Image (tube, rainbow, N blue to C red):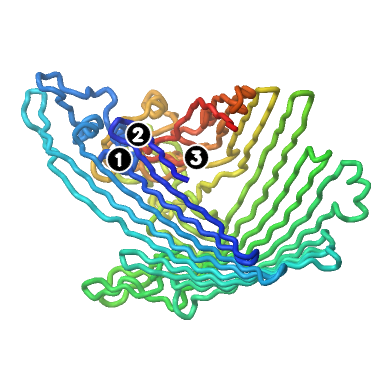
Amino acid sequence: MLGYIDENGMNELEGSNKFSARFNTNINIADKFVLLADFYAHRLQVDRLQANNDGHGLYQLAWRMNPTQPIFYESELENNYILHNNINPLASIEHGGSWNALHDRSTINLRPKYFINKNLSVEGNVSYMINKSASKYKRLTYKFFDGDGKPVNIWSNSVGASQGVSQSQVTARALINYEKDLRQGQDKIYLLGGAEIMNNTYTDYREFSKSSFFTKLNYSYDSRYLIEVTARGDGSSKFAPNNRWGFFPSGAFAWNVHNESFMNGLISSGLVNNLKFRASYGLIGNENVNPYLWQEVVNTWGWTMRVPNPDFSWEKQRQSNFGLDLTTFNNKLNLTAEYYHKFSYDLIYSDFPVPPLTGSYYLTSSVNIGEVENKGWEFSANYADKVGEVDYSIGGIFFDNQNRVLKAGYNRSDTLIFKSNQDKIWYEGIAIDNYFGYESDGYFQTWEDVDGTEAKLPNTYPGDIKYKDKNGDGVINDEDKINLGDPFPHLNYSINFNLRFRRWDFNFLGQGVGKRLGRLNGMEGYPVLMDGVNNNLGAPREYYMNNRWTPETPNSRFPRVWTGSSPNAVLSDVWLSNAAFFRVKMLQLGYTVPKIGRNINSVRIYFNAQDAITFTKWEGLEPERDGGNGNYPRMATFSLGVKATIN
């Protein structure tokens, strides 16, 4: 297989192209030995403007511009750009320079398998993968002039290149499989045992390895009772030497009720076609962290910056699941119900502050602390039937998950404050990644109101948010912050509908969230970019301006428009909004022309729309993400296609 994809960007200078190649082969020797080999490689080239190397830069620059500001001065100079805080997106397109990147990926797999006899086989897998990347940028000197032709700024010459961190991964796996029918084919047993080792090496001198030993037993009794038992031991070099190994067993049981004799009447009538109960329980380990976190880090002055932790080890989860599968009405209706519970403990916290030692001013360590509970359910249904010449199916999924912190630290009474995110705090009973901020109490209406209120933040003006002094000490500080809610989507659902009539076909997919609390921040929430320096870039959104506080509109949705330092730009319930939504993910209408000539079996012409319509009360741009400083929003895609089937 050879492939080539060329995609254009949002302007004529940007885009990407990708070359790919894949080769697969199977070699059979004497019906006992099989060698499967595959090779895959691709090269991706990405061309962007230097101001847009993250894919969002130009859009963010446009947000920071005054939308009524002209692009050029009215002067005799050609393309005499007007800079606003050294920003002009069109000038960046023409004179801001280019950025180019290459990404290479190659993978080779060899999978030999040998059949000792019809029941017993051994197999292996050796694979090698390498990722490489590089980038370069170039910008020529360009001088800007004001309306009178006087020089005002220079974008100087800038040239450079960098080599990305390359990653190589070697994996070796060995398996032994045993499969046999018992009791004249009424029962079946399957036994697997194996080992795997994986090594990852990076060109920035990082390296980590993982080893696993595992075994699995499956037993089917009379096609009614299914049992699976798994045991595995995993070791990772990311953890301290005496704590690198973890043992993670699991078990599952299923009951095919439809194969019981007392179900014969329901089965023969077609009322029930399949009925299965399922249950599972197991221990899972998580090693998704950076290597070397357990080790000591000393800076160039000899000060200890990270305290070693010889007890640093796996994060663990105990998970149970209960399910029901039902097929009924002559296989027309399929129902599935799930309930799960996950208890996570020994959570990995990689930047835990510890008391300072002599000669050090900032100390952290990596520790295993805390407990979190997740529990949820899922229900899905699908109904398919045919009425005359119309074939149709309709289905949907409805699910939810709830999480809460059971223990934030070493004890249930502990509180964990995230120094990297002052708007998040953990304590017993709260949701992880919660919104932690101030509760509002309207707006300050007059200077008399401001001066007469003792509990307020600095630089408060009329029209600013009034925060509740929760502890009554006359000061607004972190002690007055409360849990404002969690950011996770709840009551998630999707629906699909498929219809076929003669040569026509219609497909619909919709997706939604029944409940989510989103955060408005950045330029998508605040009237200006709060960069901590100028705090005056950009122009307020029209929605903000139409709903801002003024003396004439004292009960508006948002506080006054501001620039510079403001007490409004902290997390409070004012900046939380209903992010529930329903989105038409896909609409497709097609028509199939039957056989054309001798070689064309059929030709299908179709129209497709993706992410075309969204129904929401969300006050930002994209209900599936919180507000920000102007990343590209989700875009609707409309396409026409033709698909031909040829002999």
- Which of 276 and 643 lies nearest the eye of the viewer? 643
* Secondary element type, mark 3: loop
Q: Earlier in the sequence, mark 2 or mark 1?
A: 2
Q: CA distance from mark 1 to mark 3?
A: 28 Å
The answer to whether one can see residue 537 in this image is yes
- Which of 305 and 577 lies nearest the eye of the viewer? 305
Q: Residue 458, relative to residue 369: is it above or below?
A: above
Q: Give the residue number, with chain letter if any, for mark 3.
A: 624
Give the residue type that dot 1 points to.
Asp
Q: Give the residue number, with chain letter if any, for mark 1.
A: 47
- Which of 416 and 140 lies nearest the eye of the viewer? 140
In this rendering, the count of numbered labels is: 3
Image x and y of residue 335, in percent: 75, 44
Image x and y of residue 438, in percent: 44, 47
Q: CA distance from mark 2 to mark 1?
A: 9 Å
Q: Earlier in the sequence, mark 1 or mark 3?
A: 1
Direction from residue 7 to residue 53 in the image, left or right: left
* Secondary element type, mark 2: loop
Identify the residue at image location x=65%, y=35%.
495
- Residue 9 badge: 2
Quadrant that contains the C terminus: top right
Q: Are marks 2 and 1 in contact (CB under 8 Å)?
A: yes
Q: Are marks 3 and 2 in contact (CB under 8 Å)?
A: no
As drawn, which residue projects farthest toward the bottom? 242
Q: Earlier in the sequence, mark 3 or mark 2?
A: 2
Q: What is the crowding at mark 3: few (fewer than 14 residues within 10 Å), some, or many (at least 20)?
A: some
- Which of 202 and 535 lies nearest the eye of the viewer? 202
Image x and y of residue 374, in percent: 60, 56
Direction from residue 371 to residue 622 in the image, left or right: left
Image x and y of residue 499, in percent: 68, 28
Q: Residue 246, relative to residue 394: is it above or below?
A: below
